[in-house]
Amino acid sequence: MTGWLLLLLLPFANLSAPEEASSSPDIRPEVSMKVLSCTEVVGPDTWLVLACTFNIPDKWHIYWKNPGISGVPTEIRVEGPDGFVIKPVVYPRPQVIPDSGGITYGYEKEVTLLVPIHPPATWPDQPEVEFKVSADWLVCRGACFFGEAETTIRIPWLVPAEQGAEPPPLKPWATTLLAEAYWPRPLKRRPETTAKIVDSRLIIEGRVSQVGKAGFLPDPTPGVTFGEPVHTINDGRFVLSVPFRVRLADTLGQPPLARGLLTFGDKATMPVFDVSVPINVSSTNDSSVINEKE
Amino acid sequence: MKINTLILSLATAGVLALGSSAMACDKCGCQTKAAPGSTAPAKDAAKDAAKKAAPTKATVGMKAPAFELMDIDGKKHKLADYAGKIVVLEWYNPDCPFSGKASGQSVHKRGTVSRTHDAAKKMDKEVVYLLVNSTSNAPKEAVMKRSIESRDEWKLTSPILVDYGGAVGRMYAAKTTPHMFVINGDGVLIYEGAYTDDRRGGKGGEEKNYVVNAMAAAQSGEACSPASTRPWGCGVKYPR
């Protein structure tokens, strides 16, 4: 029993972000990270989700994956045993945080980022699975400080007694957390809502939401820049028209995407949907695509 | 004062240059070296852009906006004084961990800047490397003091230009520290963006250094690719 208790408590270890002494007159804000598993156990071929919660001192902020005009993304890296597939970090809807130079996107007070992991169908007979979780962030107010933390989480490995058994249940707090509206949902989950590219614009259309006005938070791939969205409503439907430009020489070899979040309402707790539309540069005569190599 | 005389005097004072003297290398003169296939469209376009008057907003492919700033030693630097040379501008903040603050992520501490200087030394064309501090969220005296302290701490040999109020920073739309700008010998802005592809500082010498890439493009007369990347770092502390 004691061993089990230790296993459960271990992930709660609070790690602060030590860094070298700074000559800055500002006092370093203590951002902390804790990592929890959303399930008590992990089993073969079922999803495991790690919840990484950052506590941020009042009035300071860390950044979304697209930090905006300045800042750097908060990043998490997870290392696990062979066969466990670590998926990209899921970031909740960020706040819009004005900076002296423009708009940034990030989080204040507390934020949880998720790391989905898919276990293999089989696993050697070991009682638990260990993951090393490391993270880094830039925390800013007037001054900025780089922070990082690392921890290890061990989760019991449990093979169900019979094939086809239910996957391990979510912990109650995880059920609540994952039900929040601020997690980006696939756009196709929102009825009658579409995203497409027309000429040099990303056009998102759908039913007007009771929650609030539709908006767009950009997360462009390299070489893609967005302009200001234009929002119109007609007959109970909204249209968001977001101009963009692609500079092929600056894509760093990545396929360009018109990517970002469709948001509703002005609060960071409100609903949000993933938008990602490939920009077909080879078949377009679009003047927004700049190819200086031609 | 003629350009060469000015460069030499600044270099002698240890104010200008990458390393103690590399940036003041005058042996190659101020003319852009003719590149193989120098009639390339990219070069012609650059020359066309250079003929136009300096704009008030920085745009890649266009003539870089003119500026005149004093450095922390009270010496005046005009962009026009460096005509014919490759000019690298690094937006700088002594209190940003990606820039001048002692941190494993600082481009100065982790050797990115010195590797850039080494690469510049290998080019036979003069390269002028300037740090620009647009920090304006503290009294000017405090900003100056921190700049001087960091110059001494890092033994910086490149001048730190003081852009208090952020007029030049806003003209160049400098967003972060560091935010890099490379201007070719014709005075055309050919690159703006991140220093490298390694914001965390884990790649060491294996990082892709966009500034070195742009300097090489300026040297050869080829088009710079990438010409624009997303910069990373602390926000430039403009006055609110």
Image (cartoon, rainbow, N blue to C red):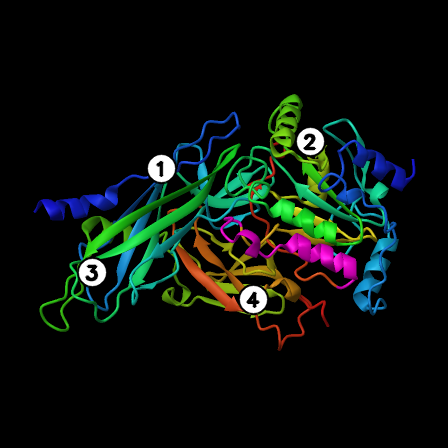
Mark 3 burial class by Cα count in 10 Å: few <14, some 14-19, many 20+: many
Residue A256 circle label:
4
The numbered mark, 1 or 3, whose residue comes first in the sequence reads 1
State how far apart marks 3 and 4 are (Cα): 36 Å
Q: Nearer the viewer, residue B118 or A115?
A: B118
- Tell me if mark 4 has few (under 14), some (14-19) or many (20+) residues whose alpha carbon lies within 10 angstroms of its own: many
Total numbered labels:
4
Residue picked out by circle 1: A16
Q: CA distance from mark 4 to mark 2?
A: 36 Å
Judged from the image, the secondary structure of the residue bearing numbered disc 4 is loop
The amino acid type, in three-letter code, at marker 2 is: Gly
**Residue A95 magenta-drawn?**
no
Pointer 2 local density, CA inside 10 Å: few below 14, some 14–19, many at least 20? some
Element type at marker 2?
A: loop
- Do the CB atoms of the residues marked 3 and 2 lie less than 8 Å apart? no
Gap between marks 1 and 4 measured at Cα: 37 Å
Q: Which residue is mark 3?
A: A42
Residue matched to label 2:
B165
Q: Nearer the viewer, residue A92 or A17?
A: A17
Q: CA distance from mark 1 to mark 2?
A: 35 Å
